[in-house]
Amino acid sequence: MFRSVVKSSDNVTEASFKIAWNIAKAKKPATEGKFLKKYICGLCGITVFGMGDDIIRQISKLQLSDSTVTRRVEVISDDLLSQLLKYIASAEYFSLALDESTDRTDIGQLIVWVRFLKGDTFAEGMLALLPLTGQTRGEDIYSAMMSFFHGPGKNINLKKLVSLTTDGAPSMVGKEKGFIALLRKDPETPDFFSYHCILHQEQLCSKLRGGELKVTMDSVTRKQSILFLHTH
């Protein structure tokens, strides 16, 4: 009887995690959990579906308050990051791509993508989204990155870094105080290749000659988007 109660509780918890995961994937607010719970209970109560009272009782046990859904999403996020860090630690090499932009509250946000070899295939994922609450100079980006790399539970081995892709902003590629220059001076970091993001180069090229290439750029971007949708 005790095992049965524990099993039932585990199933309810797992179900609430799956619902929280789908809410996050759909980019819906955490308050959607209460609505879904009420909706599912009402749906199960319709006699045409032949659902029993026991199923409705189990669904009513789902913990889907906005605070609970938020905690579930945070736990899932931490677990995904933990798995990604394990893959990076086991990989022989990895590469990074960085891009900095400003959100609607005028706070700089640095997005970091990582790519590595997982078995016989390449894998990639978002490694971090780091807020730059002060300035967005090369020193600030470097400081934020180092704090993340050496943060609790991270300890990413930068000796495995083989390439770094950024835009052409001075804060990234500045000869003396750009992020890449500062990273090259770090004794932990070996010689790595640095690249100017091809997407940024395409955008810059499309602005040449009074915008004559914009038509070509829009056509290429549209076809790339269609190809991406067909292949994914």
Image (cartoon, grey):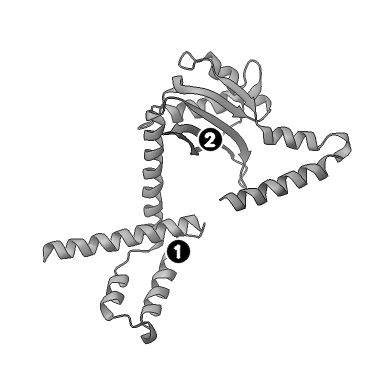
Residue at image x 68%, y 36%?
199
Residue 22 in the figure: left or right of residue 1: right
Q: Which mark is residue 112?
A: 2
Hey, which quadrant is residue 86 in on the image? top left
Res. 132 in view? no
Residue 28 vertical position relative to residue 192 in the rendered view, above or below: below
Q: Residues within 10 Å of mark 1 (few under 14, many from 20)?
A: some
Q: Nearer the viewer, residue 173 or 30?
A: 173
Residue 215 in the figure: left or right of residue 228: right
Q: Secondary structure at mark 2?
A: strand
Residue 94 vertical position relative to residue 26 in the rendered view, above or below: above
Hey, which quadrant is residue 49 in on the image? bottom left
Q: Secondary structure at mark 1?
A: loop
Res. 21 in view? yes
Q: Nearer the viewer, residue 51 or 158?
A: 51
Residue 57 in the figure: left or right of residue 184: left
Q: Residues within 10 Å of mark 2 (few under 14, many from 20)?
A: some
- Residue kind at label 2, given as amino acid type: Val
Which residue bears the numbered disc 1?
31
Q: Nearer the viewer, residue 213 or 204?
A: 213
Residue at image x 29%, y 60%?
13
How far is mark 2 from mark 1, CA to CA?
29 Å
Q: Number of marks in the image?
A: 2
Residue 172 vertical position relative to residue 7 in the rendered view, above or below: above
Q: Residue furthest left?
A: 1
Residue at image x 45%, y 19%?
159
Residue at image x 41%, y 40%?
81
Q: Position of residue 22 (x, y in %)?
A: 44, 59
- Residue kind at label 1, given as amino acid type: Thr
Q: Position of residue 167 (x, y in %)?
A: 66, 30
Quarter of the image containing the N terminus?
bottom left
